[in-house]
Amino acid sequence: MVRGDVKAARRPELRLPELRGYGGGLEPDGDYDGLEFTGTDLGGQDGAGARFLDCVLAGCGLDGTRLRHARVLDSRLTGVRGVGTDLAEATFRDVELFDARLGGTQLHGAVLERVLIRGGKIDYLNLRKARLRDVVFESCVLVEPDFAGARLERVAFVDCAVRSADFGSATLTDVDLRGAGPLEIARGLDRLSGAVISTAQLLDLAPALAGELGIRVED
């Protein structure tokens, strides 16, 4: 369904305090408050259940980092990179993620609220059964993102590429896809009720929509 009254996503408004530099590692259920991680290699470390409040992670390595059930609040991540980062069932609230280079990030069952993802490239992002509310994807590239079974409310895609997305069994409310170019949907075209797309996108998706509906198009 195409709608003109889509509600805009609210963006995070960070007001970070003066931060203290931190060069140590992660611990399960660790508590990190008002810290700045700069260029720290956190690859392979276990921070499951940790809490990050008023933190900045800049240029950090996250290869295979385990952060399942972590809580990231009022924080900024910039230039982080990694493959296979485990953030399943984590919580992100009032978070900015800038210029990330990530692959195979596990965010299934996660909760994202007032999150801005700007710049960078994320391959094979797993957001299955996640809950996204007031989330903006801006000027980034998403390759095969998986939103299957997720709930998206007030989510916007702004000047970004979305390739081979899976929306199977997802629920969309006030999702603005007009700024996605290209917009490629591999699965879940029937779940786009509650989203708004442009006329040009509708024309691009027409062959796939016809196939989804079992319509044979012949000239």
Image: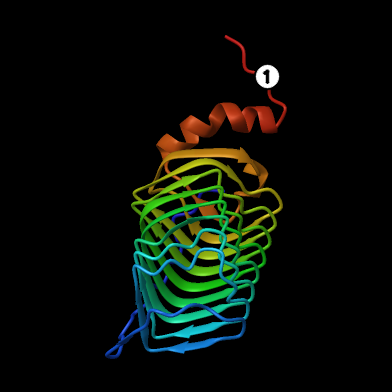
Relative horizontal placement of residue 100, taking residue 104 as reference (left or right): left
Residue beneath the point at 34% across and 67% down: 39
Residue beneath the point at 44% across and 70% down: 115
Q: Nearer the viewer, residue 145 or 170?
A: 145
Could you say where residue 148 lies in the image, as x and y percent from the top left? Answer: 67, 53
Residue 60, quarter of the rendered image: bottom left
Could you say where residue 62 lies in the image, as x and y percent from the top left? Answer: 48, 62
Looking at the image, residue 54 lies above or below residue 78: below
Q: Which residue is mark 1?
A: 216
Of the residues shown, which amino acid type is indicated by label 1?
Answer: Arg
Could you say where residue 111 lies in the image, as x and y percent from the top left? Answer: 59, 72
Colour style of the rendered protein structure = rainbow
Label 1: which secondary element: loop
Could you say where residue 121 lies in the image, as x and y percent from the top left? Answer: 41, 49
Q: Residue furthest front?
A: 24
Looking at the image, residue 133 lies above or below residue 3: below
Looking at the image, residue 32 lies above or below residue 1: below
Q: Residue furthest top?
A: 219
Q: Quadrant of the C terminus?
A: top right
